[in-house]
Image (cartoon, helix red, strand yellow):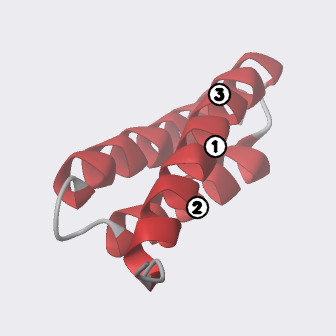
Amino acid sequence: MQQPIFWDIAGPISLFLLGISFILSIFFFIKKRVKFIILCSIVSLIVAFITLWSIGYYVLILAIVQFGAAVYLSVKIN
């Protein structure tokens, strides 16, 4: 039996982290926590880098939207 290679493990785990990050970014947008939305955006950028060979470009769009939400909140609050 062949041992799983790194990407067989890292891909699904990174997509799981992306889902959690996306849900948390929605929660923090409702709570108006800009710092945490930026943190979720960084997590999405890391996942985009890990999955760049397959769906990373779509994940990159999600990270840009999250960063845009953080900028929107920071302008709206101040």
Residue positioned 31% across, 65% down in the render: 51
Residue named by callout 1 = 21
- Mark 3 vs 1: CB contact within 8 A: yes
Which dot marks residue 23? Answer: 3
Quadrant of the snapshot with the C terminus = top right
Quadrant of the snapshot with the N terminus = bottom left
Residue positioned 35% across, 49% down in the render: 64
Please state which amino acid type lies under the numbered disc 3.
Ile
Please state which amino acid type lies under the numbered disc 1.
Ser
Residue 69 is situated, as x and y percent measured from the top left of the image, at 50, 34
Q: Is residue 74 visible?
A: no
Residue 60 is situated, as x and y percent measured from the top left of the image, at 29, 55
**In this picture, residue 56 sits left or right of residue 46:** left
Give the Cα distance between marks 1 and 2: 7 Å
Badge 3 marks a residue whose secondary structure is: helix
Residue positioned 66% across, 44% down in the render: 37
- Mark 1 vs 2: CB contact within 8 A: yes
Residue 19 or residue 78, whichever sits in front: 19
Residue positioned 63% across, 54% down in the render: 38
Does 58 sit above or below residue 45? above
Neighbours of disc 3 within 10 Å: few (<14), some (14-19), many (20+): few
Please state which amino acid type lies under the numbered disc 2.
Val
Does 6 sit above or below residue 69? below
